[in-house]
Image (tube, grey):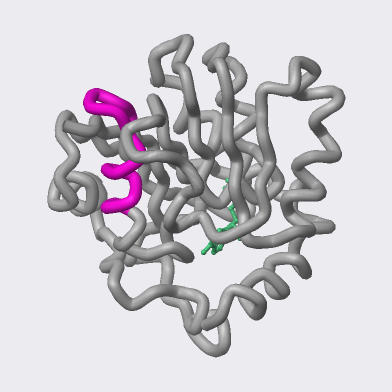
Amino acid sequence: MDHDTRAAFFDGTAENYDEDTFHAQVAAALVEPLPPAPGLVLDVATGTGFAAYAALRLKPARVLAVDLSPAMVARAEAKASSLDPDGRIEWRVGPAVPMPAPDGSADVVLCASSLHFLGAVAFADWLRVLKPGGRLAFSVVSGARFRPSGPFADFVPQDLSFPLDEAGAGALASSAGFVDVAAQTFTVDGGDRVRSVFLVHATAP
Ligand SMILES: C[S@@+](CC[C@H](N)C(=O)[O-])C[C@H]1O[C@@H](n2cnc3c(N)ncnc32)[C@H](O)[C@@H]1O
């Protein structure tokens, strides 16, 4: 699927995206265990910016947040005056693989609720942009819960096998070459709907 078609789909979801608080909770949980004061943080497929804004808690020097959808990025930027008064986040519209960042430049790569749109090809790019010892934090949907069908299936790359358990989620990172991999299940019980994803933290060798 070409980038314009993909961007148009996500443009259509932008207006109401922030009404669902699950994605904000996933982003906050991804950032929470990361060490403070990183130099450059990359937020891959930032959407309306949940992970980029969560990363400000780490007091980074700079955050670069990239997403294909102009409407999602516009929603993200609209929150900057209240959530990023220092202007640490740079917003960019465009493909997030490859990230528009030099090799070995990033201390942290974040990818919240988006790997299933990017595919396994993203891991090689994250190894490229991270400094040795840089941290990767991503979420991934469970293959037991996520079964894309109909036109939506076209959005999901074929090169990613969705994990069934924490070991499988961690293996996505370790088989790509990351070390010190830790995976956990993150669940939110919303009463009528229980949702869960795997959170993976790993280090670039
Ligand atoms: C479910 S949203 C997640 C957004 C955000 N990371 C969050 O935690 O809420 C998926 C996002 O991936 C973006 N996306 C999909 N494919 C992309 C690509 N190839 N490059 C950049 N962004 C992409 C979409 O535009 C959308 O904003």
Position of 70 with respect to 196 (left or right) is: right
| Ligand 1 falls in quadrant | bottom right
Q: Residue at x 54, y 89 (%)?
A: 150
- The residue closer to the viewer here, 172 or 186, is 172
Q: Residue at x 79, y 40 (%)?
A: 77
Residue 120 shows up from this direction: yes
Which percent across, then down, holds residue 92?
Answer: 66, 47
Which percent across, then down, holds residue 49?
Answer: 67, 40
Task: Name which quarter of the figure residue 81 lies in.
Answer: top right
Task: Name which quarter of the figure residue 91 lies in.
Answer: top right
Position of 12 with respect to 119 (left or right) is: right
Residue projecting furthest to the bottom: 150
- Up-down relation of residue 44 to residue 12 (above or below): above
Q: Residue at x 20, y 34 (%)?
A: 181
Q: Residue at x 33, y 51 (%)?
A: 125
- Up-down relation of residue 163 to residue 167 (above or below): below
Which percent across, then down, holds residue 67?
Answer: 62, 54
Residue projecting furthest to the front: 102
Q: Which residues are magenta?
A: 123-135
Residue 112 shows up from this direction: no
Q: Quadrant of the C terminus?
A: top left
